[in-house]
């Protein structure tokens, strides 16, 4: 049929000639419009601040929550740049990320911004930017996280502060220190330097032990108040002040982030000492305390947090070792010596096993005839890094860490074996005795008697050819095990000598009760004889009295540090039995001693050209 229009059949199928859309299409359009109205209603009523932004960053529409957050009406936000409204252009990184989302190159962006509320208060906002599906626009939403931020700040404060003193704790201190060192040393107005006063209270443990931890905590809080006052009153301080922190226990630190030099730190340390020395009145308790302070001041460049704290800790140790109640400035030279000492300490024990030690021998010469009667064994450390080291560089370290027992046993065995070898090589000459230094710790930490007996049996050396030297301070006042060991060694036939006699306790009453056979006069007495043109009669009187006393007790006397013929002549006249010093020979290798066995030592340094084995004549036994 012509001239008719299409309609729809019962099933809603389009009929040719009809001008109305199909039923299903009308339903879809109606549903889309209804959904759009719902979306717009939800957008407008939402508590979350939201705005639709076009690809140029201009606000297309904004909800009431967004307008309320900014203190305006929604219509007033139209056509404004969203970046200006929520401060997205204040730093380059945030601005770049935001632009990437607008251009469709990034799916989502989130940041935290600090915004100013119309009523004047500050709020923290979490800004999220994400593309709108099937559109070139993006959705910008803002969540007020001020409460969350405040809670986080409170928790962080609790985490970063000491509950007793309310000062920053160790964690916050190191965070601030690291941040200071990472900042540019060339910022405008910066000195490029940093300083640290690291202190602890002297005797604080006694307060806790006697008065209890409650009083101890009050004292710490009072100390913290005074430290803060000292830091705040520092006339050199720049904006921001100094950080005062409690690092733990009774340890505190004052960080000067932009110091003006060591004088500033010294003034600060002095003011802290003066403040803490004033009495504290705490709940009826009047307490007095002092502090030891390590002071470090240096340039930012080349400084690390670890290095700065190590230097401060070392300097605090020096302050305590120097007598407490004082401040000490970091000394690079002293620290280098400490580091060398530490390096020696860590390698001393294995050095014995590696064969890095060697013995040299210095003759003990009869004053009357110049004949070599014995030798003193002197240990040298051929260190792979520091070269040949004399005993004064490492013996004290060995005594502190206990390795002196192992080292002393090696020295004793090597010296006895060498003395026995000389005896075998020169059977017609009178045998030399060998004198070996013994530390008192060898007596306490090992069975010295068993060691000596075993080594003598092993090497075949007769006991009377071994002389053991102990310092006067170690022998005088010996009781219990040391005295018993000395007596057993003497009974065995070993000779006992007191080294450096006249410089220690000088308790002469002990000489009649100790199993001693030899006194070695300290070199300080012999050096008094050097001015032969104007001799001091008192020096000679003192030495003469000691020699006469020793002889009356049946002891022999050895004079150390004999360097001139004049000294030797006066000592011989006084009655010294043997002499030791550069006049006769410096400490030399064992093969050079063989030259002296069958002929007298020279009476002047020109008589025998021997190599220098020690740095100067002040070394004991050299």
Image (tube, helix red, strand yellow):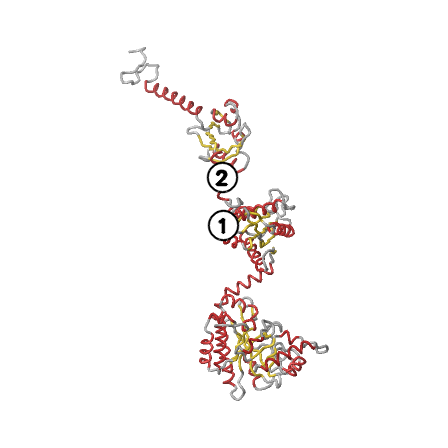
Residue projecting furthest to the right: 533
Q: How many marks overall?
A: 2
Q: Which residue is mark 1?
A: 213
Residue 595: which quarter of the image? bottom right
Residue 451 is labelled as none
Q: Is residue 52 above or below residue 492?
A: above
Is residue 81 visible in the rendered image? The answer is yes
Residue at the image point whose x is 46% and y is 75% from the top: 451
258 w.r.t. 509: above or below: above
Residue 340: quadrant of the picture: bottom right
Q: Element at badge 2?
A: helix
Q: From mark 1 to mark 2, how far is it between C-alphas?
A: 27 Å
Say few, some or many: other residues with alpha carbon within 10 Å of mark 1 (under 14 / 14 to 19 / 20 or more).
Answer: few
Q: In percent of the image, x 51 and y 23: which residue is there?
A: 73
The residue depicted at 53 percent of the width and 89 percent of the height is 428
- Residue on which the image places disc 2: 154
The picture places residue 127, in percent across and down from the top left corner, at: 48, 33
Earlier-in-chain disc, 1 versus 2 = 2
Element at badge 1?
helix
Q: Estimate the x, y position of residue 352 in percent, counting from the top left.
A: 48, 70
Nearest the eye: 317 or 130:
317
Measured from the top left, where is residue 417 in percent x and y? 49, 79
Q: Quadrant of the N terminus?
A: top left
């Amino acid at each position: 049929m012509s001239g008719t229009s299409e309609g729809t059949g019962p099933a809603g199928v389009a009929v040719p000639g009809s001008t109305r859309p199909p039923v299903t299409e009308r339903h879809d359009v109606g549903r889309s419009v209804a959904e759009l109205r719902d979306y717009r209603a939800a957008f407008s009523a939402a508590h979350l601040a939201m705005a639709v932004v076009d690809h140029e960053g201009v606000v297309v529409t904004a909800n009431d929550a967004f307008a309320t957050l900014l203190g305006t009406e929604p219509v007033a936000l139209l056509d404004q740049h969203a970046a200006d409204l929520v401060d997205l252009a204040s730093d380059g990184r945030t601005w770049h990320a935001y632009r990437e989302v607008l251009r469709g190159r990034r799916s989502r962006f989130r940041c935290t911004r600090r915004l100013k509320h119309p009523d004047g208060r500050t709020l923290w906002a979490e800004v999220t930017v994400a593309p709108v599906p099937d559109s070139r626009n993006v959705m910008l939403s803002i969540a007020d996280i001020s409460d969350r931020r405040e809670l986080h700040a409170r928790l962080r404060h609790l985490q970063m502060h000491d509950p007793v003193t309310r000062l920053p704790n160790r964690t916050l201190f190191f965070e601030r220190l690291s941040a200071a060192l990472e900042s540019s040393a060339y910022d405008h107005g910066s000195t490029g330097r940093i300083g640290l006063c690291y202190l602890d209270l002297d005797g604080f443990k006694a307060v806790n032990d006697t008065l209890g931890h409650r009083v101890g905590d009050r004292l710490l809080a009072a100390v913290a108040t005074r430290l803060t006052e000292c830091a705040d009153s520092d006339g050199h301080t720049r904006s921001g002040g100094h950080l005062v922190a409690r690092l733990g226990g009774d340890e505190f630190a004052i960080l000067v982030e932009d110091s003006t030099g060591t004088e500033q730190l010294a003034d600060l340390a002095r003011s802290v000492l003066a403040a803490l020395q004033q009495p504290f009145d705490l709940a009826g308790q009047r307490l007095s305390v002092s502090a030891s302070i390590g002071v470090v001041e240096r340039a930012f460049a080349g400084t690390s947090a670890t290095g700065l704290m190590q230097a401060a800790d070392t300097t605090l140790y020096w302050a305590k070792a120097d007598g407490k109640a004082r401040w000490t400035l970091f000394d690079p030279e002293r620290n280098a010596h400490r580091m060398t000492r530490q390096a020696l300490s860590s390698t001393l024990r294995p050095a014995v096993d590696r064969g890095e030690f060697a013995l040299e021998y210095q003759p003990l010469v009869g004053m009357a005839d110049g004949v070599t009667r014995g030798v003193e064994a002197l240990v040298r450390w051929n260190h792979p890094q520091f070269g040949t080291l004399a005993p004064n560089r490492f013996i004290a370290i060995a005594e502190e860490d206990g390795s002196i027992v192992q080292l002393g046993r090696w020295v004793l065995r090597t010296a006895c074996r060498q003395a026995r070898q000389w005896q075998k090589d020169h059977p017609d000459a009178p045998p030399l005795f060998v004198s070996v230094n013994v530390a008192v710790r060898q007596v306490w930490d090992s069975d010295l008697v068993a060691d000596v007996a075993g080594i003598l049996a092993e090497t075949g050396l007769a006991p009377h050819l071994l002389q053991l030297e102990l310092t006067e301070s170690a022998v005088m006042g010996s009781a219990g095990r040391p005295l018993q060991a000395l007596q057993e060694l003497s009974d065995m036939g070993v000779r006992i000598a007191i080294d450096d006699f006249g410089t220690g306790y000088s308790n002469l009453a002990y000489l009649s009760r100790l199993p001693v056979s030899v006194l070695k006069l300290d070199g300080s007495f012999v050096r008094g004889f050097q001015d032969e043109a104007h001799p001091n009669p008192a020096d000679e009187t003192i030495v003469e009295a000691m020699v006469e006393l020793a002889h009356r007790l049946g002891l022999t006397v050895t004079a150390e540090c004999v360097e001139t013929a004049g000294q030797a002549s006066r000592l011989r006249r006084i009655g010294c039995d043997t002499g030791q010093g550069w006049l006769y020979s410096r400490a030399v290798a064992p093969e050079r001693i063989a030259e002296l066995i069958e002929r007298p030592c020279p009476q002047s340094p020109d008589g025998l050209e021997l190599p220098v084995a020690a740095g100067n004549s002040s070394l004991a036994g050299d």
